[in-house]
């Protein structure tokens, strides 16, 4: 995925004794799948949350309905609450969250290809960023978002 060596990512997490959780919306579990495609990943990957609907984000991750109403699901604020919620609701030390518009569609204010990410780690401030992948089509946006999320996890282990 996007040049990320997932085996190496898992090995570095294993070496540091860190567990990983994912909180995914537009990628629908693709990050967790990429991690768990590797044999032996069960000692590093704790769990993945697929929270496609706003209700799931609230119920499973504790995302605030007020944040969803004020910022919308595709926002760094929601990604932050997703990542921090995944950390709080798992045995993980590191959590990545993804929420975006894979397409088709979007709006003038939130175009297709906009994906917000958050990386939460115990004892560290949560890091957020937004990527504008463009109207590449649903499959390519999801693949790009998956690769980007894996890159964030890898950079946290550097």
Image (tube, grey):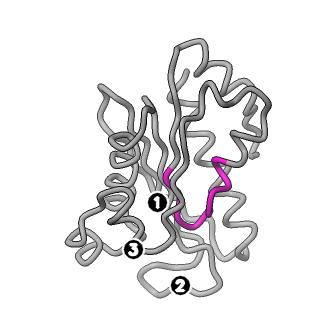
Outermost residue, top direction?
15
Q: What's the mark number on residue 54?
A: 3
User: Callout 2 environment at 10 Å: few (<14), some (14 to 19), or many (20+)?
Assistant: some
- Indicate which disc, 3 or 1, sits on the residue closer to the N terminus: 3
Q: Position of residue 150 (x, y in %)?
A: 63, 42
Q: Position of residue 14 (x, y in %)?
A: 61, 18
Q: Nearer the viewer, residue 136 or 154?
A: 154
102 above or below 82?
below
Q: Secondary structure at mark 3?
A: helix
Name the residue rendered at 34%, 29% in the picture: 122
Q: Residues within 10 Å of mark 3 (few under 14, many from 20)?
A: some
Residue 139, located in which quarter of the rendered image? bottom right
On residue 39, the disc is none
Q: Residue at x 46, y 87 (%)?
A: 108
User: Circle 2 sits in a helix, a strand or a loop, which is it?
Assistant: loop
Assign a secondary structure to mark 1.
strand
Q: Circle 1 is placed at which residue position? A: 116
Question: Tag 1 or tag 2, which sits nearer the N-term?
Answer: 2
Residue 96 shown left or right of residue 134 in the figure? left
Q: Is residue 64 above or below residue 30?
A: below
Between the residue at mark 3 and the residue at mark 1, the CA separation in whole angstroms equals: 15 Å
Q: Which residues are magenta?
A: 23-32
- Residue named by callout 2: 106
Residue 125 left/right relative to 149 = left
In the rendered view, would you say 57 is above or below 11? below
Q: Residue furthest left?
A: 66
**Which residue is located at x 65 percent, y 53 percent?**
146
Among the 4 quarters of the image, the one containing residue 45: top right
Q: Is the C terminus in the top left, top right, bottom left or bottom right quadrant?
A: top right
Q: Nearer the viewer, mark 3 or mark 1?
A: 3
């Amino acid at each position: 995925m996007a040049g990320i060596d997932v085996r190496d990512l898992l090995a570095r997490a294993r070496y540091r004794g860190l567990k990983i959780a994912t909180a995914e919306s537009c990628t629908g579990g693709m990050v967790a799948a990429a991690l768990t495609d590797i044999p032996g990943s069960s000692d590093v990957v704790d769990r993945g949350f697929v929270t496609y609907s706003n209700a799931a984000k609230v119920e499973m991750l504790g995302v605030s309905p007020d944040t969803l109403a004020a910022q919308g699901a595709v926002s760094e604020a929601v990604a932050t609450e997703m990542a921090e919620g995944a950390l709080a609701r798992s045995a993980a030390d590191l959590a990545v969250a993804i929420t975006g518009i894979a397409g088709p569609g979007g709006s003038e204010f939130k175009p297709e290809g906009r994906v917000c990410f958050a990386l939460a780690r115990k004892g560290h401030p949560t890091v957020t960023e937004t990527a504008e992948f463009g109207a590449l089509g649903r499959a390519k946006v999801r693949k790009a978002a998956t690769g980007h999320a894996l890159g964030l996890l890898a950079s946290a282990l550097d």
